[in-house]
Image: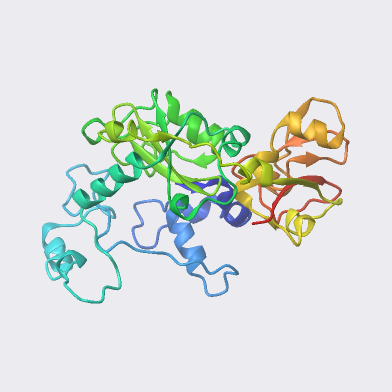
Amino acid sequence: MIPSRVYWRWLKPQWPHDEFFRHNPAFPEYPREWDDFVRLLWAHPEHPQRPACLYPEVPRSHHQQDPSPRLSGPHSTTAALQRERFDGMRLASGVHSAVSIAMHTSAAAYDVWLAWQLRTGWRIATVEPRLLAAQLPAVPAKAEADVALVLFCANCSGGNGGTPAPVNGDGWAKLLVRQLGLLARGPDGAVRGHYRGLVGLRWLGRRLWIVAAESPFADAAAQAVAVPPVTPGRPTLLEAARLVASSRGESCVDACAPAMCDDGLLPLANACVVLSEHFDASTSCDEAPSDVDGGAAFPGKGTDGRLYLGHVAQMRCDARAANVLRLCVCIEL
């Protein structure tokens, strides 16, 4: 899964015409897909961000010729090509060295680590930003810094016997798409990043694990404890977050300075009641217009005097839009 704001900020402005996808020099009988475009774009030497593309040690593609004509070809290999490419490989699992550049983790060891993360995590009942921020410490103690959040999703499917989790028609759609703003659906209709009924991501600066009802990790998740009360004298994340209105056309980075604006905390301002109280305006709010920097420069007050909610996955601290008064979340840690 990737945040939707990656699409709005980096991909949509440069998205190619349909002809790019119809023409595939490597496999003329097959169209190119979106990941082909992303790899070509980010590998270009003049790309301003120059992010790195990581390739797995062994690709995820089929390693045997698929009997289906639709799937055989670019996503499959013959048995001979399989041997040529992979039989001579020495995998990280077979390398023993006192100094390791990359850590190899077996599936069994990964499962043990996941179960430990869930058992020692903090159980939460909501991902609503302000309700959750009111429970979390602004500056966690050293022993709390790596504690994960655990959310049990009773109506999220998948996990039983490795069955893929469909994103439509159950709790995954509500959580991942509407509340957390992720591009969570793959071409097969399954949740991207799903592992045995478990999805991990970052939310309000912490690791969040969402556990489906049928997941083999459900028992470990049931052992997570409720978020402990914040000790007296320590502010909660909600208390430490300061709401600041920007000047017209100003970004939240500039409005917060010298304090910090964190993209992950902007959802704390994305509520109609909060906007109404801060701007002393009517209680009705509209969704941000997607043609204004993809809606990234909201929540805030538009040029027409109306209040606009931002799209969770698109909001950015560095975004700015002419004549828009942004409501920023600033924090000093």
Question: Which quadrant is the C terminus positioned in?
Answer: bottom right
Could you tell me residue 106's position as x and y percent? 20, 55
70 to the left or right of 13: left
Could you tell me residue 148's position as x and y percent? 43, 45
Q: Colour scheme used in the picture?
A: rainbow
At 27% from the left and 58% from the top, the residue drawn is 59
Give the image quarter of residue 280.
top right
Pick the residue in front: 17 or 189.
Answer: 189
* Extreme-front residue of the structure: 232
- Above or below, 93 relative to 247: below
Q: Is residue 3 visible?
A: yes
148 to the left or right of 285: left
306 to the left or right of 84: right
Say how many tags the image has: 0
Pick the residue in front: 319 or 134.
Answer: 134
- Above or below, 136 relative to 11: above
Pick the residue in front: 33 or 270.
Answer: 270
At 19% from the left and 75% from the top, the residue drawn is 97
At 11% from the left and 58% from the top, the residue drawn is 79
Q: Is residue 8 visible?
A: no
At 79% from the left and 25% from the top, the residue drawn is 284
Could you tell me residue 234's position as x and y percent? 61, 46
Could you tell me residue 220's position as x and y percent? 29, 35
Pick the residue in front: 77 or 134.
Answer: 134
